[in-house]
């Protein structure tokens, strides 16, 4: 079964941070977007793409941001994105764009980027993986992507460069009709992908892209199956609570019944997924050594430490305190 369309929590935190710095009361929109406030302080892992673009759409509608999204790549400093680092070794624009096409999906795995030669032009394109036609926030998401693609090409073509042709997914009454920034650009609307026409001679121009170190921990790879991506989506919500089936369904914009059906199709159940999540978080907390067993039990939502101990013993065969002792002993021997 196809995985959940995911976007890195780091990108979500940058977008939320820029919105907040622009005066948007971001906390007001997080709940409606089904995004955990915890991710603003600890943006590790992934969030459902639909939730992030809902945040973009709700803030766009509520705050009237409009063309703000066309400046986002510059405002948020696109060079801090993880996919930019390999581009620092590129000698030409063509090399940089090919590197971008290869590494971009690490941070935004719901998108696919490519560079396709077509006679005198090369199409730099972005395609969304999965059906996103009914998602809130499509316009700001597309505007943001346009701003990123333009910024990369402009590293060689100059700060004022615009493509002669551009394909967009929005209708002709969408965001392109509300801006004068693309005067003279021939725009094709209602396309299956977003694409900029880059003259092939530009691909041979020298380019120097300096990546900047992003804050936070390196991303783990996005899961390639539904169960794995569901776990990645739920992990940020585990602080102070047990995994909740209704919450999981809400994050996927579906019903608990549909969620159970999808898990059954993969040969598992909600109970199994929830227990795996709790056990993984318990092991992680035990190994960092900074919390007592009682504190870990409370963090994971257990009212009594004895209940947590019983659960852990059923999975590991030994109680959590003994598990920690064995690991610490093994580390001393090592």
Image (cartoon, rainbow, N blue to C red):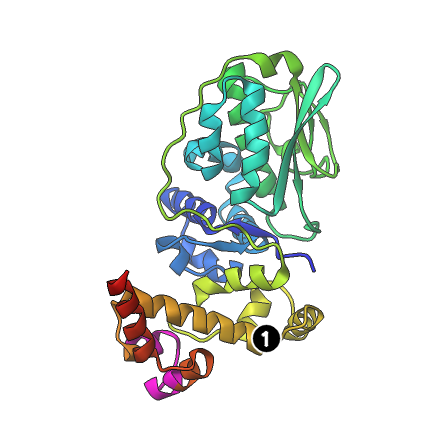
Camera-nearest residue between 221 and 6: 221
Q: Is residue 239 visible from the viewing direction of this image?
A: no
In the picture as drawn, the residue positioned furthest to the front comes out as 333
Per the picture, the main secondary structure of the magenta-coloured stretch is helix
What x and y, as percent, mark residue 120? 72, 14
- In this view of the protein, which residue sits in the foreground, 276 or 159? 276
Question: On screen, 143 above or below 130?
Answer: above
| Vertical side of 21 occupied by 241: above or below | below
**Residue 226 sits in which quadrant?**
bottom right
Q: Residue at x 55, y 29 (%)?
A: 99
* Residue 307 position within the rendered picture, expressed as x and y whole percent measured from the top left: 39, 87
Residue bounds of the magenta highlight? 295-309
Q: Is residue 302 covered in magenta?
A: yes
Q: Residue at position x 55%, y 38% from top? A: 104
Q: Quadrant of residue 261?
A: bottom right
| Residue beneath disc 1 | 270
Observer-nearest of 146 and 273: 273
On the question of residue 72 being in view, the answer is yes
Q: Residue 89 at what x, y percent from top left?
A: 46, 24
């Amino acid at each position: 079964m196809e995985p959940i369309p995911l976007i890195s929590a780091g990108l979500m935190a940058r977008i939320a941070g820029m919105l907040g710095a622009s005066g948007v009361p971001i906390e007001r929109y997080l709940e409606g977007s089904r995004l955990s406030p915890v991710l603003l302080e600890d943006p590790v892992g992934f969030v459902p793409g639909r939730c992030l673009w809902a945040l973009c759409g709700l803030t766009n509608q509520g705050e009237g941001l409009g063309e703000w999204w066309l400046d986002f790549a510059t405002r948020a400093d696109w060079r801090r994105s993880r996919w930019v680092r390999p581009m620092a070794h590129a000698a030409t624009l063509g090399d940089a764009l090919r590197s971008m096409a290869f590494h971009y999906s690490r941070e935004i795995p719901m998108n696919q980027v490519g560079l396709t030669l077509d006679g005198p032009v090369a199409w730099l394109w972005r395609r969304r993986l999965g059906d996103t036609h009914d998602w809130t926030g499509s316009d700001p998401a597309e505007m943001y992507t346009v701003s990123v693609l333009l910024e990369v090409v402009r590293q060689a073509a100059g700060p004022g460069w615009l493509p002669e042709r551009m394909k967009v997914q929005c209708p002709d009454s969408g965001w392109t009709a509300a801006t004068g920034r693309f005067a003279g650009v021939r725009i094709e609307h209602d396309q299956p992908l977003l694409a900029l026409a880059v003259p092939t001679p530009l691909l041979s121009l020298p380019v120097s892209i300096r990546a900047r170190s992003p804050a936070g921990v390196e991303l783990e790879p996005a899961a390639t199956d539904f169960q794995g991506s569901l776990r990645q989506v739920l992990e940020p919500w585990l602080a102070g609570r047990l995994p909740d089936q209704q919450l999981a369904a809400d994050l996927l914009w579906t019903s608990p019944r549909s969620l159970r059906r999808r898990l059954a199709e993969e040969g598992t159940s909600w109970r199994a997924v929830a227990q795996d999540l709790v056990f993984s978080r318990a092991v992680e907390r035990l190994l960092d050594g900074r919390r007592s067993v009682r504190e870990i039990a409370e963090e994971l939502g257990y009212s009594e430490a004895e209940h947590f101990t019983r659960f852990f013993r059923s999975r590991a065969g030994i109680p959590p305190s003994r598990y920690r002792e064995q690991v610490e002993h093994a580390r001393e021997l090592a």
